[in-house]
Amino acid sequence: LVCEDDRDIAHVIGLMLEKGGFDVDRAYTAAMALAFLEKNSYAAMTVDLDLPDQSGITLVLTLRGQAHTRNLPIVVVSASANEGRIECNSLPLNVSDWLDKPIDENQLILALRLAIDRMAEGKPRILHVEDDFDMQRITAAIAQDFAVFEFAASPEEARARLREQQFDLVLLDLALRGASGWEVLADIEALDKPPPVVVFSATELNRAKAARFAAVLVKAQTSNAEVLQTLQRVLAEAHPAGPAPA
């Protein structure tokens, strides 16, 4: 989530982040940012200190007072970032980094990735292979307090994610747009240490096919609580002493 009142600058920041592999929403006021955060779950957020309806510092303090945003990684991107850092030294902002404008693209991407990694320490990593972006956001929101989600919308994206890092669990939709989740399963099973796979798809599987997975969930028949309980159970069974190190 990019919170920046200058629409041109917000557009530029968004383009930089999209180039770095992030999906971006843009908020031009503190109120807009709060509305986005009520509806969606975000990996991280950038905040400008000079917003039209309230200061960025006040916004960050508000976020730190809310349960669902208390641990959200936040990077300040502002023309007055250094001054803000000094003035707010004693406040409980828990800001990951303070970046001055003009914005250095590489510095911005690195700051956000480090912020996300620090916040994710100790949490299991789940790769969600799903081409419905609304379903991605819903599932991540369900499990955001105990796991870190990464996403892939196609077998090619899933292969790239699996090459980049080790996951503790894969949540897999078998019916991808123009492709099949079974392709991804073959890649997972070929890994030296394949993570457990939970199917979260639209149709049921017969017993023989279901036996290849740690669990099978049917979207229309599964509540949010059941999704959460299943993920926690499978992770506990796979990593009884805690998740594998990232």
Image (cartoon, rainbow, N blue to C red):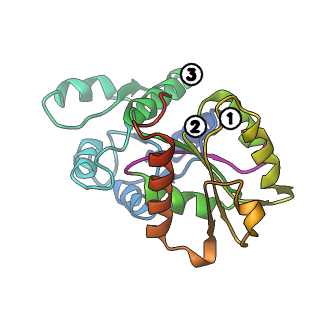
Q: Can you say whether 128 is above or below 119 in the image?
A: below
Q: Is residue 94 left or right of residue 203?
A: left
Distance of label 1 from label 3 (alpha carbons): 24 Å
**Residue 51 highlighted magenta (yes or no):** no
Badge 1 or badge 3: first in the primary sequence: 3
Q: Is residue 54 left or right of residue 177?
A: left
Whether residue 1 is visible here, answered yes or no, is no
Per the rendering, the mark at residue 22 is: none
Q: Residues within 10 Å of mark 2 (few under 14, many from 20)?
A: many
| Residue with the most extreme right position | 178
Residues rendered magenta in the picture = 145-155
* Residues under numbered marks 1 and 2 in contact, where contact means CB atoms less than 8 Å apart: yes
Per the rendering, the mark at residue 162 is: 1
Residue depicted at x 61% and y 40% = 195
The quadrant where residue 81 appears = top left
Q: Is residue 118 left or right of residue 130?
A: left
Q: Residues within 10 Å of mark 1 (few under 14, many from 20)?
A: some
Instruction: Give the amino acid at mark 3.
Output: Asn
Distance of label 2 from label 3 (alpha carbons): 26 Å
Per the rendering, the mark at residue 167 is: 2
Q: Can you say whether 218 is above or below 139 in the image?
A: below
The image shows residue 168 at horizontal and vertical percentages of 54, 40
Instruction: Give the amino acid at mark 2.
Output: Phe
Instruction: Give the amino acid at mark 1.
Output: Leu
Mark 3 element type: helix
The image shows residue 126 at horizontal and vertical percentages of 55, 45
Question: What residue did someone put label 3 on?
Answer: 106
